[in-house]
């Protein structure tokens, strides 16, 4: 018995092992041998096999089932698995390729399949290349005559999406919430396959390449809807049944959630699987509800790639629909561009015609015309010991004085005496050096902001906007700086009144003009500059050389108007002047005389002649006192060595009066033979020789001796002046004597006493011991007057910018005409691009050319701010407006007409002519990128023009920036070929962001068809995009977002640079 039982037991174990071993590489879905394990094994007594023997698999038993709803053999209880599945229960994926049939290997536990070349998917069912299908057995009968052998090169991997016989697809789940729930490190995937003959489909859900559940669908019908660029494929199945794999994800893995009951009871159908351009979705009512409730998505979204091996004659015949007719697009685009041009031209014409209407009659309420002139605080300006040092050089030393309301103070001195420097310091202008000393307004020190609120300053050089008229220039100053509660009519009246005072009312409608396009004279421009400050009727008015460039008559009129302003309206007027006429000198109330930065005189002008007579320097009778004082300070400042005699060639005056007389002769031009090339310090030495002596010298000396003599004089002068600059030599004795004489005079003592009184009074206010009599008035002075609000400033500056734009329309018209002309040229050469490789190239070339066009055309903006840099600096320093309002108006009137309209015109014309994707969404995306790119490039150029003062350097920098961005556009250098350490250069290139966005918008869903050597190749354009290093899903992020970030950041950087670094420094 024992001997008989033992062989039976061993036989049972052997048979069970055979059954288990059925999951070998030879196991397949067809030609499966009948396993011996289906027979019942018993011992001699009829008992079953030992308990240690595992139960044999039998799909006929309730305990076992065939995975993937495989067919169960009723004779042997074994499973017939679908293609791509193996193992005893059809739950193990097969590897290699679908073409290997029953020779495929099973996937090892915990590993991924290594598919053969040209095949992909979790179970290697999806063909990827035509070469992969070369060895695939034909399905559906032989397509060749006489049963000839099929040429492997005739096989195709059909990826159109439509099922011909058996189609397989590999998909990635794209629902964001599902991916987040599972974890980004675990891929969520779906495999989907259909059999057209059986009208069945199968669906498997995978997590980290481990199957969770599977479904079988029947009564399935497929349909394909061809569109111009792609196919829309839909599978509609009436019934669906699903089953969990026990112990897998969402099927009870580690005691987690198990949806097996839900799948069996709720999932019934119908179900649909539809795809467009590899973007697919799987829908079933109960499953949609589950997805919606848990993951907030309407259905499962997928990104799929499918394939089916067919003979080329079996590929579904697909006739591409005719390309849409673009005639309507072309007509509408051209009409839109023409309409924009017409509207712009009409607007500019109307604005030009209507601009003169605002200068009509002015009616003021009673007494309002005098309100501005009378409603102010008289200001006494006292300055004490003002000094200015630049490096080691003392340019101004201990200057003191007092100017009262109703007085005109003239600051005089020779060229280089320090007049303009002293005026800048009095006016609180920003200086590069160190300023010392104090200034008082009505007896107390005043902060810079409060001081500038009640003062005006007229520069020596005129900085006016050339396209404005005289009236508009002065009116804008009034509108921006006069009190906001003052009526518009009163401001216009004040403007006309000021122009009448300065004698420029007759040219009010004349434009200022620029170099080469002159309208008014230089003297008239000077008076316009003065009017811009005079119109505000400031308490204190500073002017730097107000008579510069004017003839004697107009110079007198200007000074007379300043004197009238001071005396009639109790203003304080201070200006520098250089050798005025005697009738102008007679109008002065106060005089400050400087020489080499030293104070020679400061006090009442009426007393200066008597003062100089007292110190032994009387002005000759009938001599202009201004000329006398200038000559006196110039020659007093000469070095002693320049006044010494040698060889009787120099004559030393015997007395100060004689010296002054001689100086007067020199100014009248009596010393005609003086060599002008010799510096001032040696002119007396060279020029004191008489004409007769010069002629005798020329007769008796040889030419070489004469030249040697003159050269030695020149070298001595150069050496003398160089030594003065390097060693900071002390003052010339005569000039030092003049300075000391004034410091010890009663005039200087009176000024010092006034300063001490003011300082004590100011200290009393600070300590609370007392108050100055006019403290209430001073408080009103310090409060200032509220000028135009930000909104008013922006409106006025915008109007001025618009007038400047339409009155000089050359740049505007150049942009518009070039956009239209180049759009037509592009439409001619790129007309109706084809959907092949050459069409792909033409599209990229068009995009590259378009970006280069708008990128380099933005360099025209360099001059827009450069031409107004000095104007902005001075107007802001004089309190016209804030940086923000100027910058806002500047950006607005550069962006709208020059940077938004041209790309719209260009895009509207070129889009239809070229034949780009004819969809509304794609069209407006194209326009969005063009406009956003042009704005970004414009602010790059704006930033360069603000940050770099030199237009030439800014132009070079702008060109280099454009070329750098062009290099990394993505067309010239493939991103993947750039070293990883330098790929960030593509990220910071706004050209790359725009180029990639345009390419993706046009080519993402496009299929290219190319016929070579009789073979038709159908390639998705996205594949070629990736070959170029471009990402097919990067339209909004990062490209469009990056362009927006570039525009925002560079706009902010431009404003901050303008506000903090573009400032007046004198």
Image (spheres, rainbow, N blue to C red):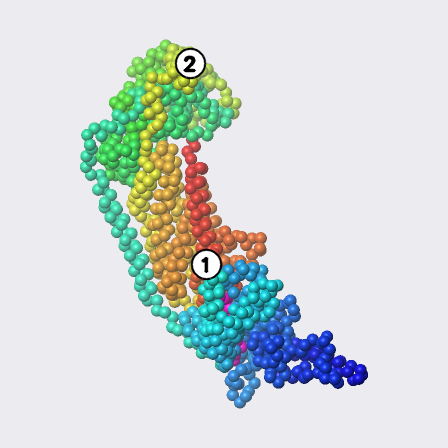
Side of 746 where 102 appears, left or right: right
Q: Nearer the viewer, residue 308 or 881?
A: 308
The image quadrant where one finds the N terminus is bottom right
Label 1 crowd (10 A; few <14 / some 14-19 / many >=20): many
The rendered magenta stretch, by its main secondary structure, is classed as strand
**Residue name at image x 55 percent, y 64 percent:** 188
> Residue 208: percent from the left, percent from the top?
59, 65
- Indicate yes or no whether the magenta region holds residue 310: yes
> Residue 237: percent from the left, percent from the top?
46, 75
Number of on-image labels = 2
The residue where tag 1 is placed is: 1035
- The span shown in magenta is 300-311
Q: Nearer the viewer, residue 1055 or 768?
A: 768
Instruction: Indicate the secondary structure of the residue bearing disc 2.
Output: helix
Alpha-carbon distance for marks 2 and 1? 78 Å
> Which disc number belongs to residue 743?
2
**Residue name at image x 29 percent, y 36 percent:** 479
Q: Are marks 2 and 1 in contact (CB under 8 Å)?
A: no
Q: Nearer the viewer, residue 35 or 149?
A: 35
**Residue name at image x 37 percent, y 48 percent:** 895
Side of 531 where 721 appears, left or right: right
Relative vertical location of residue 816 with respect to residue 229 in this rendering, above or below: above
Relative vertical location of residue 240 with respect to residue 509 in this rendering, above or below: below
> Which disc number belongs to residue 741?
none
2 vs 1, front mark:
1
Q: Residue furthest bottom?
A: 146
Relative vertical location of residue 1007 with respect to residue 310 in this rendering, above or below: above
**Residue name at image x 19 percent, y 37 percent:** 361
**Is any atom of residue 930 visible in this view?**
yes
């Amino acid at each position: 018995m024992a001997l008989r039982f033992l062989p039976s037991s061993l036989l049972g174990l052997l048979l069970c092992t055979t059954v288990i071993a059925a999951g070998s590489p030879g196991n397949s879905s067809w030609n499966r041998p009948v396993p011996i394990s289906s027979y019942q094994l018993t011992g001699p007594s009829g008992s079953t096999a030992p308990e240690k023997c595992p139960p044999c698999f039998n799909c006929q038993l309730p305990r076992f089932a065939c995975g993937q709803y495989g067919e169960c053999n009723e004779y042997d209880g074994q499973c017939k698995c679908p293609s791509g599945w193996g193992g005893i229960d059809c739950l193990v994926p097969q590897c290699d390729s679908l073409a290997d049939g029953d020779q495929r290997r099973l996937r090892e536990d915990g590993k991924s399949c290594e598919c053969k070349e040209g095949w992909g998917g979790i179970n290697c069912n999806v063909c990827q290349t035509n070469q992969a299908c070369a060895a695939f057995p034909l399905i559906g009968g032989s397509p060749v005559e006489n049963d000839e052998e099929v040429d492997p090169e005739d096989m195709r991997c059909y990826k159109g999406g439509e099922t011909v016989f058996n189609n397989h697809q590999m998909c990635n789940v794209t629902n964001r919430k599902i991916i987040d729930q599972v974890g980004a490190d675990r891929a969520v995937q779906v495999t989907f396959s259909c059999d057209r003959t059986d009208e069945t489909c199968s669906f498997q859900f995978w997590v980290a390449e481990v199957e969770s559940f599977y479904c079988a669908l029947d009564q399935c019908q497929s349909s394909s809807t061809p569109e111009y660029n792609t196919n829309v494929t839909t599978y509609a199945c009436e019934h669906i049944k699903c089953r969990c794999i026990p112990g897998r994800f969402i099927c009870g893995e580690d005691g987690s959630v198990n949806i097996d009951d839900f799948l069996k009871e709720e999932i019934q159908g119908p179900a649909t699987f539809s795809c467009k351009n590899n973007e697919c979705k799987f829908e079933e009512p109960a499953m949609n509800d589950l997805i919606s409730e848990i993951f907030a998505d309407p259905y499962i979204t997928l990104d799929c790639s499918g394939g089916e091996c067919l003979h080329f004659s079996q590929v579904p015949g697909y006739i591409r629909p005719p390309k849409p007719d673009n005639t309507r697009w072309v007509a509408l685009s051209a009409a839109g561009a023409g309409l924009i041009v017409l509207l712009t031209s009409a607007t500019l014409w109307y604005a030009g015609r209507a601009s003169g209407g605002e200068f009509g009659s002015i009616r003021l309420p009673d007494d309002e015309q005098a309100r501005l002139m009378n409603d102010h605080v008289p200001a006494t300006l006292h300055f004490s010991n003002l000094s200015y040092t630049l490096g080691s050089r003392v340019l101004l030393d201990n200057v003191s004085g007092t100017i009262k309301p109703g007085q005109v103070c003239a600051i005089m001195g020779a060229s280089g005496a320090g007049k303009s420097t002293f005026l800048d310091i009095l006016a609180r202008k920003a200086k590069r050096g160190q300023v010392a000393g104090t200034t008082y307004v009505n007896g107390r020190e005043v902060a810079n902001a409060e001081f500038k609120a009640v003062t005006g300053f007229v520069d020596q050089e005129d900085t006016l906007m050339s396209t404005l008229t005289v009236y508009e220039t002065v009116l804008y100053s009034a509108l921006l700086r006069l009190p906001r509660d003052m009526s518009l009519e009163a401001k216009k009246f004040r403007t006309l009144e000021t122009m009448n005072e300065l004698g420029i009312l007759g040219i009010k409608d004349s434009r200022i003009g620029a170099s080469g396009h002159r309208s008014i004279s230089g003297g008239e421009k000077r008076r316009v500059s003065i009017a811009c400050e005079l119109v505000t009727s400031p308490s204190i008015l500073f002017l730097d050389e107000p008579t510069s460039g004017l003839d004697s008559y107009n110079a007198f009129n200007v000074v007379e108007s300043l004197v009238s302003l001071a005396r009639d309206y109790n203003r304080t007027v201070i200006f520098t002047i250089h050798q005025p006429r005697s009738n102008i000198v007679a109008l002065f109330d106060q005089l400050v005389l400087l020489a080499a930065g030293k104070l020679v005189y400061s006090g009442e002008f009426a007393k200066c002649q008597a003062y100089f007579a007292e110190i032994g320097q009387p002005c000759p009778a009938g001599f202009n006192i201004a000329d006398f004082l200038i000559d006196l300070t110039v020659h007093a400042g000469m070095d002693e060595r320049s006044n010494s005699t040698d060889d009787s060639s120099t004559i030393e005056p015997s007395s100060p009066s004689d010296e002054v007389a001689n100086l007067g002769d020199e100014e009248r031009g009596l010393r005609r033979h003086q060599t002008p090339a010799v510096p001032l310090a040696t002119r007396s030495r060279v020029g004191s020789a008489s004409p007769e002596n010069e002629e005798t010298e020329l007769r008796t000396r040889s030419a070489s001796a004469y030249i040697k003599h003159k050269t030695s004089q020149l070298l001595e002068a150069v050496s003398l002046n160089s030594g003065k600059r390097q060693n900071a030599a002390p003052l010339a004795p005569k000039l030092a004597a003049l300075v000391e004489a004034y410091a010890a005079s009663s005039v200087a003592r009176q000024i010092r006493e006034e300063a001490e009184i003011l300082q004590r009074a100011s200290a009393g206010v600070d300590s609370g011991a007392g108050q100055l009599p006019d403290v209430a008035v001073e408080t009103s002075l310090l409060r200032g007057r509220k000028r135009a609000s930000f909104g008013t400033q922006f409106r006025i500056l915008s109007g001025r910018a618009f007038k400047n734009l339409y009155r000089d329309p050359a740049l505007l018209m150049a942009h518009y005409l070039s956009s239209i002309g180049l759009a037509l040229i592009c439409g001619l050469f790129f007309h109706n691009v084809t959907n092949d490789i050459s069409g792909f190239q033409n599209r990229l070339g068009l995009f590259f050319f378009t970006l280069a066009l708008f990128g380099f055309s933005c360099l025209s903006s360099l001059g827009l701010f450069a031409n107004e840099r000095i104007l902005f600096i001075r107007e802001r320093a004089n309190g016209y407006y804030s940086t923000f309002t100027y910058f806002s108006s500047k950006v607005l009137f550069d962006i709208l007409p020059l940077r938004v309209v041209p790309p719209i015109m260009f895009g509207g014309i070129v889009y239809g002519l070229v034949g780009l994707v004819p969809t509304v969404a794609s069209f407006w995306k194209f326009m969005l990128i063009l406009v956003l790119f042009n704005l970004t490039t414009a602010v790059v150029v704006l930033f360069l023009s603000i940050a770099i003062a030199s237009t030439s350097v800014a132009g070079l920098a702008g060109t280099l920036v454009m070329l750098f961005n062009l290099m990394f556009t993505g067309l010239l250098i493939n991103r993947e070929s750039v070293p990883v350490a330098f790929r960030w250069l593509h990220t910071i290139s706004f050209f790359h962001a725009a180029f990639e966005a345009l390419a993706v918008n046009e080519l993402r869903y496009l299929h290219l068809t190319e016929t070579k050597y009789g073979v038709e190749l159908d390639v998705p354009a996205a594949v070629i995009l990736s070959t170029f290093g471009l990402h097919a899903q990067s339209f909004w992020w990062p490209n469009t977002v990056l362009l927006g970030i570039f525009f925002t950041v560079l706009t902010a950087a431009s404003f901050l640079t303008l506000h903090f670094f573009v400032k007046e420094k004198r």
